[in-house]
Amino acid sequence: MAVQPYDPENIFAKILRGEIPCGKVYEDDHVLAFNDINPQAPTHVLVIPKGAYASFDEFSAKASDAEIVAFNRAVGKIARDLNVAEDGYRLIANTRQNGRQDVPHLHVHIIGGKMLGLMLPKE
Ligand code: 5GP
């Protein structure tokens, strides 16, 4: 199946353009991070690149070294700054149909602040 082109009307693209507000927790030249609107744990932050990438595989193939470094550094910094690094947290990047991705702009969930459940529910 062909990968769909990036949809510039997705919700995170609108947040990046300032058309929808967000609870910003971090921003630099390449990265924005904000609180999830429907948190699944005391800490639930979404980290997104500012560039138009739908998935991690697309990002890793097409983004510049500067974007990739900034994104990776930001994820770790935010985890430290939100004080979840010591006790632990989970990174999730749901991807496309099988990964149940709802918003087609790459985002890493940083989830922590409590003991989390199993990584995947038993089916
Ligand atoms: P996905 O299922 O694509 O991995 O996760 C999308 C996430 O985006 C969900 O956790 C959902 O709660 C969050 N979300 C959806 N719309 C908005 C919004 O308008 N603002 C914020 N801050 N989060 C959103």
Image (cartoon, rainbow, N blue to C red):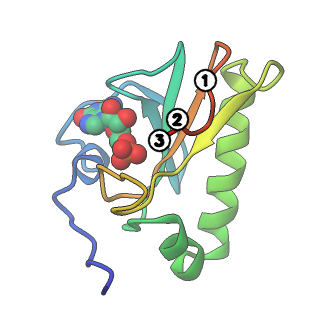
Element under disc 2: loop
Q: Secondary structure at mark 3?
A: loop
Cα separation, mark 2 vs mark 1, equals 8 Å
* Residue bearing the label numbered 1: 117
Q: Which residue is depicted at the point 33% across and 81% down?
A: 3
| Contact? badges 1 and 3 (CB < 8 Å) | no
Q: Which class describes the residues within 10 Å of circle 2: few (<14), some (14-19), or many (20+)?
A: few
Of tags 1 and 3, which is closer to the observer? 3
Under 8 Å from ligand 1: the CB of mark 2?
no
Counting from the top left corner in percent of width and height, residue 53 is at: 41, 68
Q: In which quadrant of the rendered image does the N terminus lie? A: bottom left
SS for callout 1: loop
Query: What residue is rendered at 58% in x and 28% in y?
Result: 111
Tell me, yes or no, whether the two marked residues, 3 and 2, touch with CB atoms within 8 Å. Answer: yes
Q: Is residue 102 left or right of residue 108?
A: left
Q: Position of residue 51 (x, y in %)?
A: 42, 65
Residue named by callout 3: 123
Q: Amino acid at mark 2?
A: Pro
On the rendered structure, is 55 left or right of 21? right
Tell how many labels.
Answer: 3
Q: Which mark is residue 88?
A: none
Residue 31 vs 95, above or below: the answer is above
Q: Residue at x 38, y 24 (%)?
A: 23
Seen in the image, is 23 located left or right of residue 87?
left
Of the residues shown, which amino acid type is indicated by label 1?
Gly
Q: In this view of the protein, which residue sits in the foreground, 84 or 95?
A: 95
Q: Nearer the viewer, mark 3 or mark 2?
A: 3
| Mark 3 → mark 2, Cα distance in angstroms | 6 Å
Task: Look at the numbered discs 2 and 1 and tell me whether their residues touch, using CB distance below 8 Å.
Answer: yes
| Rendered location of residue 71, percent (x, y) | 62, 55
Quadrant hosting residue 83: top right
| Residue under pointer 2 | 121
